[in-house]
Amino acid sequence: MSNNLVDSSYDTVVVGAGNAALCSAIAAKLQGANVLVVERAPKEKSGGNSYFTDGAIRVAYGHFENIRKVIPEITDNEAENTIMPDYDTEDFYDDMMRVTEGKSDPELASQLVGKSLETIFWMREQGVEFELNKGNQSFVKDGKREFWGGLPLKTKNKGIGLMGYLFQRLNELGIDIVYDTRAIELVREEEKITGVIVEQEREMVKINCSSVVLANGSFEANKEMRKKYIGEEWAEARVRGTEFNTGDGIEMALAVGAQKYGEWSGCHSIGTDYHVPEVGDFNKPGDIFKKHSYPLSIMLNKEGKRFVDEGADFRNYTYAKYGKEILKQKDHVAYQIYDANTRPLLREEYNLEEATCVQADSIEELADKLSVEKEQFLNTIKEYNNAIQDGEFNPSIKDGKHTEGITPPKTNWAVKIDEAPFYAFPVTCGITFSFGGVHTDKEGRVLDGDGNPIKGLFAAGEMIGGIFYGNYPGGSGLMSGAVFGKLAGTSAGKYVQNKEEIGS
């Protein structure tokens, strides 16, 4: 459609064009609503943070047979040579509560977990294709591929593929979308949402509608909001995804009485290549700058000291909080150290041309090539090597091969760094999204300060607060976007069509 919105009227307006937003738009359309998607970014930069993801999506799949239903291309021979532990709703919920230290809203967490598998099947019905997450979540041992960490599923062609499938479905359903259009303000009359004001080509335009789904992300790309809510040092964090997630939707919702919710001082952040762009580069999507093999490494700062237990748990359960720890280090940099024995085990992102790597034939030479305090650097590695206890190294499980007598310890996957050549990968902190948002119920209805639904207002994705605190299980962000996107869109469509009493 053209971008001309003057005098336009829709049943439902969805703000944003990432995974959560498009799932909302599709779900509302399937309820019979006339839907418009409003995207702030130009068309060539659309897709939100979802476009930049690796595509891994956490689901309580129960048994491997459910994965085969999602990926029917898996052959019987491949299945016979695949080891995939069961992962049910209790496992997913326990992971949520464990990594958030019990702070995740039980109702929202239960909804996310309980609706995850049916939402995956629904996404497949909408044309999204999936594949096994082999490269990042499995190792081959004795001729069998062994998966670990509850994350064996990903979308084909990463986030690029996911968004391609969803945009294609939008087109099939005849859902209108406008680009270069920034939602500015919600219109509320007689205690219900009746429209949204957007900025288009420097002009303000009112779109009349009966319901609005806000799904345009959190505030991670807004430096001032990061400093205000998360901390001054967060001005230095690199933005991993879209530059357009500046908190617009959150501020619009708060302006009409929405309740703040969740950990406003927290965020999802990771260790990413030190030379990553300041904001996501749409010409290099697919989460190619991350550096997530650190459980096999030791990480040292410029002072030559370790600062986290790299092997505390599988990468899936620590990576979202370790970016914060890297940001605390001098000059916001750390070095992941590997030797010839561990280097072949590293994930595919370490082999890309974008990966920054320093290589040397001795530890002393490596120290000379890095901006570190050499004596302490060498001593740290020596103490680490001497502290490693006997045991069998196995990266497919938490092998318990650990250190003793050093702080911090390394709880799993402790292997000596003593075989040349040696490698250092410099990393810094990349922020993905902030955890603070607005309060919704489990159907995606935005709640006011008294806990009552604001009639006609719904939210999904990173807009929702209260789900993640301090950390999150890998892949649960995409799943949350899809689950609550589908729920919010369905609720908005039903609200418009008066199929059930919404907002009472």
Image: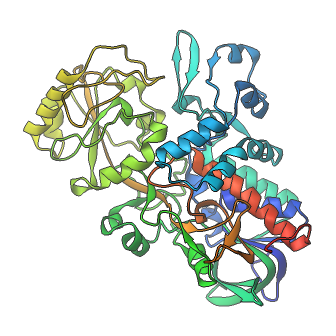
| Residue 277 in picture, x, y percent from top left | 41, 57
| Residue 74 in picture, x, y percent from top left | 73, 24
| Colouring scheme, one of rainbow, by chain, secondary structure, one colour | rainbow
Side of 70 where 327 appears, left or right: left
- Taking the spot 52% from the left edge, 64% from the top edge, the residue there is 262
Side of 294 where 76 appears, left or right: right
| Residue 475 in picture, x, y percent from top left | 57, 44
Side of 223 where 139 appears, left or right: right
Can I make out residue 271 in this image?
Answer: no
**Quarter of image, res 9:** bottom right
- Taking the spot 18% from the left edge, 47% from the top edge, the residue there is 302
- Taking the spot 32% from the left edge, 32% from the top edge, the residue there is 297
Image quarter (top left, top right, bottom left or bottom right) of the C terminus = bottom right
Pick out the residue farthest to the front: 450
Q: In the image, is residue 176 above or below residue 131?
A: below
Can I make out residue 276 in this image?
Answer: yes
Pick out the residue farthest to the top: 142
Foreground of the two, 28 or 62: 62
| Residue 23 in picture, x, y percent from top left | 74, 57
**Quarter of image, res 466:** bottom right
Image quarter (top left, top right, bottom left or bottom right) of the N terminus = bottom right
Q: How many marks?
A: 0
Foreground of the two, 447 or 250: 447
Pick out the residue farthest to the left: 375
